Image: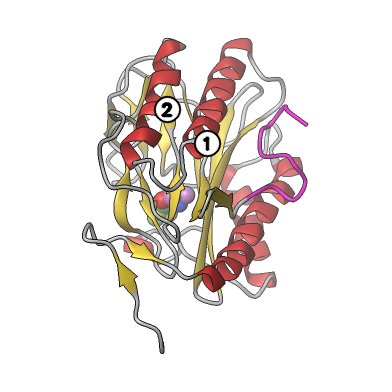
Amino acid sequence: MDQKTRVTREGIRLYAPEDFAGMHKAGRLAAEILDRVIPLVVPGATTGEIDHAIETMVTEAGATSATIGYKGYQHASCISINHVVCHGIPSDKKLKDGDILNIDVTVIVDGWFGDTSRMYVAGKLPRKSERLIDVTYEALMRGIEAAKPGNTFGDIGFAIQSFVEKNRMSVVRDFCGHGLGQVFHAPPNVLHYGRPGTGPVLQEGMFFTIEPMVNIGRPETKVLADDWTAVTRDKSLSAQFEHSIGITPDGCEVFTQSPLGRFHPTYG
Ligand code: MF3
Ligand code: CO
Ligand code: CO
């Protein structure tokens, strides 16, 4: 590294304009894998089979899974069904008609991390699940709209929380987004709730995820005995969407856009 690495006083790294290309490449691969998973999500399929297909796609692309070996995690994806909030472990459990699920993939390409997740449905999408998915998707989009220089991380959290609560759903507090780039999880914690004008000021060159988890019921979660699977305490349905983004002089670029335009399961 010939140029000095720039870091804010909150410990947030500011990447250079030429670093965006590496993030676009990693983000595009993660998003393309999520596109290619769409036909595999059908009633009767197991989450283990889907994960195995994802692992093969990562390997065949010449990339590395960021999650295999991460804190002892052994899979190329997290697959979180219905009331599972996040970090669901792929298994031989079969999908049922009407199940909704989040699939979260993180890949490393040339040292850059691409992290994205989105919602899928097995079979026919139930009405109330559709509403949850729509609110969660829109919450992420409002967070992304608030991601521009001069705004703060609190503005992003407020944009998400106020929209979700106006729709009488709740934002999970126990998990957050994160800085990423040449590392998987870096400062800051990107909270999906907050007050306008609070938190670090957004600056050009910050790379981070926004990944709100929204519950139909109460926000509390608990982690199961496997030490990974987080579920809603009240067993209510939960949804999540995640993009990796980079702050530009006038807004942000999304690194994990779906090449097929299929990020939302029913739009487009
Ligand atoms: N991809 C997840 C995130 O959005 C992290 C998964 S870590 C794992 O930050 F070990 F559970 F895979
Ligand atoms: Co993430
Ligand atoms: Co993720």
- Residue underneath mark 2: 159
Going by the numbered disc 1, the residue's amino acid type is: Glu
Q: What span is colored magenta in the figure?
A: 257-268
In-image side of 105 versus 73 (left or right): right
Quarter holding the C terminus is: top right
Question: On screen, 266 above or below 45?
Answer: above
Report the Cα–Cα distance between label 2 and label 1. Answer: 9 Å
Say which of 187 and 110 sits in front.
187
Measuring 39% from the left and 20% from the top, which residue is drawn there?
162
Say which of 64 and 194 sits in front.
194
- Residue underneath mark 1: 145
Residue 222, by quadrant, is top left
In-image side of 66 versus 45 (left or right): left
Going by the numbered disc 2, the residue's amino acid type is: Ala
Question: On screen, 77 above or below 145?
Answer: below
Residue 102: x, y in percent?
Answer: 54, 37
- SS category of the residue bearing label 2: helix
The majority secondary structure of the magenta stretch comes to loop
Measuring 71% from the left and 34% from the top, which residue is drawn there?
42
Say which of 73 and 65 sits in front.
65
The answer to whether any part of residue 92 appears in the image is no
